[in-house]
Image: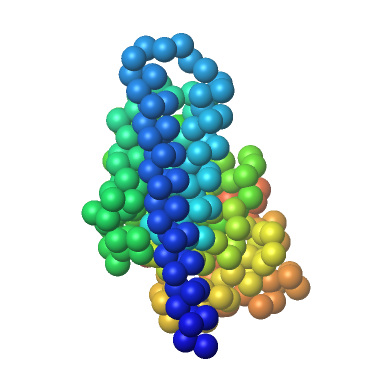
Amino acid sequence: MAEAANAMEDMMARLRREFLDTADDRLGTLDELVDEVRQGKEDSPERMSEFRRIAHSLKGMGGTFGYPLVSVIAHRLEDFIESEADLHDDVLADVQIFLDRMRDVIDGVLGADDPNTAEIVRALPVKRAGFDAEAIEVLEIEVMTVMPKGTATTIVEKELRACGYRVSNVEQPIQALEYAVRTKPDMVMASGVLPGLTGVDLACAFRAMPVTKSIPVVLFTSFSRDHKSLSGLPEDVPIVKKGGTFSDDLANALIVSGLT
């Protein structure tokens, strides 16, 4: 039994070493892509596709091999460049910060599952597409949206960013729970319809766990509160309805959640 356990530990240690080598190589490739822009090479859709592909692979590998902080930073990097057609001078300095923080983890400067993950993540650059970063003061308030990509999500994120909040989106509800535990957002806003779990399920999960029960949760839905699909929603979870009452509902939800 002990021999089997030791063999498993040895295998996991070997896989982690291989991950570190692979991650180091991939970060090196991302640095090279950034350097291409600094050197004035022409815009290239292929360059951005390669950059996104590598960032996505680092996000998946980090959690698998025991480096969740790499996954969280890579996810934020994906979110940051989502609206960018290519790397360009305006975002290079910010993109480099994401790469440097991931390398800090790989090199052991930061812990693989650092206890200061929330502080590290809040120090990362904020997504600027869609609003004038010069005109809006970015607040130290972190909002996690849990929504599928689409027009509605874009509208919600734009409204929240216009308030000065730092916003990140997670599409998968299970991943949202994991990230919330690590990054400790000031509020979570979930769509009523999600893959795997409903928004009501997610709100109940947040309320059930001691580590997340104090995080305000808001539900984004098409239904009124008395609809049967919302019967299990905790009473203290406000709803924001799509449509004409959206702005008023959102303002009320932010007040109830203590963000304004």
> Residue at coordinates 49% horizontally, 32% vertically from top-left?
51
How is the structure coloured here?
rainbow
Q: Nearer the viewer, residue 134 or 71?
A: 71
Judged from this view, the residue extending furthest toward the front is 3
Quadrant housing the C terminus: bottom left
Task: Identify whether 43 is placed above or below 187.
Answer: above
> Residue at coordinates 39% horizontally, 19% vertically from top-left?
36
Residue 186 visible here: no
Residue 245 location (% of width, % of height): 60, 52
Q: Nearer the viewer, residue 143 or 258?
A: 143
Residue 214 location (% of width, % of height): 41, 75
Residue 35 visible here: yes
- Residue 9 in which image quadrant: bottom left
Q: Nearer the viewer, residue 137 or 26?
A: 26
Task: Identify whether 46 is placed above or below 249.
Answer: above
Residue 20 location (% of width, % of height): 39, 51
